[in-house]
């Protein structure tokens, strides 16, 4: 099972991609030489910025004649950055490289001929032998490879404050199911905690939603949402949306004005007991001086043990990239053993390369490496593995609407309409 889910996301992406030819008819060709190497990301603070800085430092030391310019666009999950990247690409003003996600998200760029095939770089650097084949499949269309993965992150995790749980007489272990978790949340709320489950703006709600869908539908049912084999209109989805609606009643009212550092900070300072977020959280907690297992604990979202909700940050080479040589050098650093180690030590994710030594990493990362090796893998919705950006944007609008006006029926109708529209356009394009 585990690899089927990953492969099916790759097949989905492949089935909906058009030829890699520009929407103005141009070839996805190589760019100029010389000038600045501009790298666009959404990593602006904490462990994310530290990871990016580590890569830049390595690049500067290995390529002292190149001049790297970092263009970070604030906003967790990359909502703002993705818009700006698409705008720059559309205006034929690409950066030398930009952050994307492995999987469906890349199809938006490949379909319109915005990316160069970097298979030759894979050959030169021997990457076909060091990245997992299923991951390479998610970066490949019609035999051409389109980006270099920097890491692997897991999305389906609860981060909890052990002192808060102890004070409430709750165990420091995962509730067995969402229903059991709701009992604990209710107990905390009745004990006076206003928002036991901390959450932030729309994208973090999509993130919570995907983990509830995995919990209620299981890995196959969840993966089927993206290839049409699971019916978005079914009673199982209604039940999952009701669970989601119940969880949202335990969240903070000011969510729309927060991003993930603030909502995870609410757990760190004991204002909330839990948050659901990807494993970029420990890097940020560690930088706040918190100690794993003592000051914070974690477990898979109840009902998702044995499932790894996967995403990979991946760097691209745009068509007509300024300073083609410098851009390729940047990708060489991202894919190198040293680059992956420096980056992931600071970022908290695990290396995408299979030749990393677990002993180099901390307690959380070692457990994530073990889980990635043994769990069922499913593609993250919010973080680009499962769908195109267009479909994700429609789901995000539905989630934002639900946050303001929690009507499960209308929510499901919106999700069904989004699925129909996107699956139809995918079928039309293939
Ligand atoms: C994800 C990205 C992670 C992390 C997170 C929060 O989309 O893949 O690396 O940056 O957003 O900003």
Image (spheres, rainbow, N blue to C red):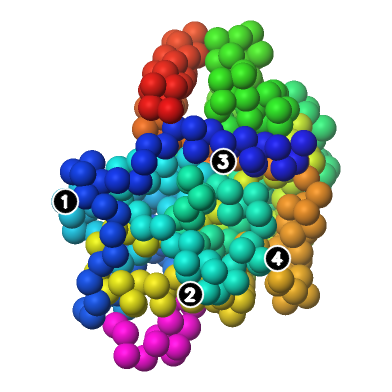
Mark 2 lies on a secondary structure that is helix
Of pointers 1 and 4, the one earlier in the residue sequence: 1
Of pointers 4 and 2, the one earlier in the residue sequence: 2
Question: What's the distance in space between the residues labelled 1 and 2, CA to CA?
Answer: 27 Å
In the rendered structure, the answer to whether residue 401 lies left or right of residue 187 reads left
Residue under pointer 1:
91
422 w.r.t. 279: above or below? above
Residue 58 inside the magenta-drawn segment: yes
Q: Quadrant of residue 420?
A: top left
Count up the numbered dots.
4
Residue under pointer 2:
332
Q: Position of residue 128 (x, y in %)?
A: 61, 63
107 w.r.t. 43: above or below? above
Question: What's the distance in space between the residues labelled 1 and 3, CA to CA?
Answer: 29 Å
Q: Who is closer to the viewer here, 406 or 319? A: 319
User: Marks 4 and 3: which is nearer the front?
Assistant: 3
**What is the quadrant of the C terminus in the image?**
top left
Mark 4 lies on a secondary structure that is loop
Circle 4 Cα neighbour tier, 10 Å, few/some/many (<14 / 14–19 / ≥20): few
In the rendered structure, the answer to whether residue 34 lies left or right of residue 49 reads left
Residue 373 inside the magenta-drawn segment: no
Circle 3 Cα neighbour tier, 10 Å, few/some/many (<14 / 14–19 / ≥20): many
Question: What's the distance in space between the residues labelled 4 and 3, CA to CA?
Answer: 20 Å
Residue under pointer 3:
10
Q: State the residue at coordinates (43%, 46%).
A: 106
Q: Which label belongs to residue 354?
A: 4
395 w.r.t. 342: above or below? above
Which residues, given as a range, are shown in magenta?
Answer: 51-67
Mark 1 lies on a secondary structure that is loop
Mark 3 lies on a secondary structure that is helix
User: Marks 1 and 3: which is nearer the front?
Assistant: 3
């Amino acid at each position: 099972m585990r690899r089927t889910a990953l492969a099916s996301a790759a097949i989905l992406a492949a089935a909906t991609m058009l030829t890699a030819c520009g929407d103005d008819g141009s070839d996805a060709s190589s760019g100029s030489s010389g000038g600045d190497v501009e790298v666009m990301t959404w990593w602006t603070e904490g462990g994310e910025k530290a990871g990016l800085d580590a890569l830049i430092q390595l690049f500067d030391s290995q390529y002292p004649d190149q001049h790297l310019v970092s263009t970070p666009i604030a906003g967790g999950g990359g909502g703002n950055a993705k818009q700006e990247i698409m705008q720059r690409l559309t205006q034929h003003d690409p950066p030398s490289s930009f952050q994307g996600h492995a999987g469906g998200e890349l199809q938006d760029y490949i379909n319109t001929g915005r990316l160069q095939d970097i298979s030759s770089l894979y050959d030169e650097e021997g990457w076909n032998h060091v990245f997992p084949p299923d991951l390479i499949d998610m970066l490949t269309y019609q035999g051409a490879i389109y980006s270099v993965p920097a890491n692997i992150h897991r999305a389906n995790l609860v981060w909890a404050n052990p002192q808060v749980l102890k004070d409430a007489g709750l165990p420091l272990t995962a509730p067995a199911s969402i229903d059991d978790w709701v009992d604990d949340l209710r107990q905390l709320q009745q004990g006076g905690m206003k928002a036991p489950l901390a959450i932030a703006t729309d994208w973090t709600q999509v993130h919570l939603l995907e983990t509830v869908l995995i919990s209620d539908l299981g890995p196959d049912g969840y993966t089927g949402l993206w290839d049409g084999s699971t019916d978005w209109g079914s009673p199982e989805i209604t039940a999952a949306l009701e669970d989601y609606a119940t969880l949202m009643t335990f969240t903070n009212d000011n969510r729309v004005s927060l991003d993930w550092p603030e909502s995870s900070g609410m757990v760190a300072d004991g204002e909330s007991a839990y948050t659901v977020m990807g494993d970029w959280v420990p890097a940020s907690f560690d930088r706040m001086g918190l100690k794993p297992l003592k000051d914070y604990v974690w477990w898979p979202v109840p009902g998702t043990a044995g499932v790894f909700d996967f995403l990979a940050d991946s760097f691209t080479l745009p068509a007509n990239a300024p300073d083609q040589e410098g851009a390729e050098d940047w990708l060489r650093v991202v894919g190198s053993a040293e680059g992956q180690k420096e980056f992931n030590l600071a970022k908290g994710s695990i290396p995408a390369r299979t030749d990393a030594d677990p002993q180099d990493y901390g307690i959380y990362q070692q457990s994530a490496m073990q889980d990635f090796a043994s769990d069922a893998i499913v593609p993250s919705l919010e973080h680009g593995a499962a769908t195109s950006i267009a479909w994700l944007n429609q789901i995000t609008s539905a989630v934002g609407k639900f946050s303001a006006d929690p009507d499960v029926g209308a929510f499901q109708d919106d999700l069904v309409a989004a699925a129909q529209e996107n699956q139809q356009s995918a079928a039309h394009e293939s």
